Image (cartoon, helix red, strand yellow):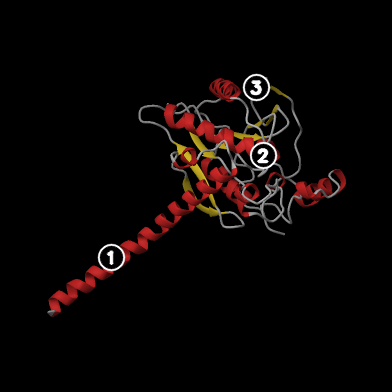
Amino acid sequence: MTVKQFSRFVNLLILNGLMLFWQAPALAQGDDVSALCRQIANKLASVDLRDCLDVNLINTGAYSVENKPLVVKEYPPLPGRTPMGRVLLLGGIHGDEYSSISVVFKWLRILEEHHSGMFHWRVAPLVNPDGLLRGKSQRMNANGVDLNRNFPTPNWHVEAVNYWVNQTYRSPRRYPGPAPLSEPESLWLFKEIESFKPDVIVSVHAPHGVVDFDGPHEAPKRLGQLHLKLLGTYPGSLGNYAGLLKGMPVLTIELDRAGIMPTRYEIRDIWGDMIRWLRKNLNKNTVYSPQADQLPEAS
């Protein structure tokens, strides 16, 4: 081998090495999403593996306590059409609310086929993967924290702890954590809200069988078979943080049952009524408030 040939050989090795270096994160992230989809499909009978893989969920680069990827799918504005608003759709904040995850996957399928550009969507079907994918699913994350009590609301260190101690009698299912945003999942969602700046947040839960609402705009009287019933706000809750503090409408859809899916007609009716409410209440002028933009101190 001549010196020139050897030089070309070395350069080729370097080039291939750089290509592998740059491709590795993408491949690893893709593998992470595929593995997550397999786990979800194995856990939830109502979510087929293809339902998860075919929507091409994106690894955001953030991970849960147990190193599972936190994933989203975005349906951005389409050419020639200005969306009426930005919608952040969330499922699975509580890992034992199976139907909240499954229904969001059904709605992802609708968006895959019918995204018209009317709204700019960002969808996170499973905010709490560790809670769902345990042997016995649980409301809390892997650290035993209720993510829906871990958001930075005013006087959190006093009010969240007092509520947990005096109102829930230290229920493990309602533990707010050692500090606001102490958990990677809630911190990730906080940052998603800050970056995406949604005009409305739609969060799917179960099993109260009602529509709950926090923040500005008129609440929908009903979505499908679910009727409006305000459940109140709690220290550290997403509704308290985003709805009251940030001024973002938080529409909470509480399905009837956590372990049993609504019928396909009920799923369709809830979706249709929600889209009609969004069309009536959103426009391109954001309602986002700059209040509380900064990360709180850990103390």
Q: Is 198 situated above or below 134?
A: above
Q: Mark 3 vs mark 2: which is more N-terminal? A: 2
Where does the image place residue 282, in percent across and percent down from the top left?
55, 25
Q: Nearer the viewer, mark 2 or mark 1?
A: 2
Please give the label number shown on residue 152: none
Query: For the residue labelled by badge 2, is the local secondary structure a helix, a strand or a loop?
Result: loop
User: Disc 1 designates what residue?
Assistant: 16
Q: In which quarter of the image is the C terminus?
A: bottom right
Q: Quadrant of residue 98?
A: top right
In space, the residues marked 3 and 1 are separated at their CA atoms by: 56 Å
Where does the image place residue 97, in percent across and percent down from the top left?
67, 39
User: Disc 3 designates what residue?
Assistant: 220
Where does the image place residue 211, in percent across and percent down from the top left?
68, 27
Callout 2 amino acid: Glu
Where does the image place residue 46, in percent across and percent down from the top left?
57, 35
Callout 3 amino acid: Pro
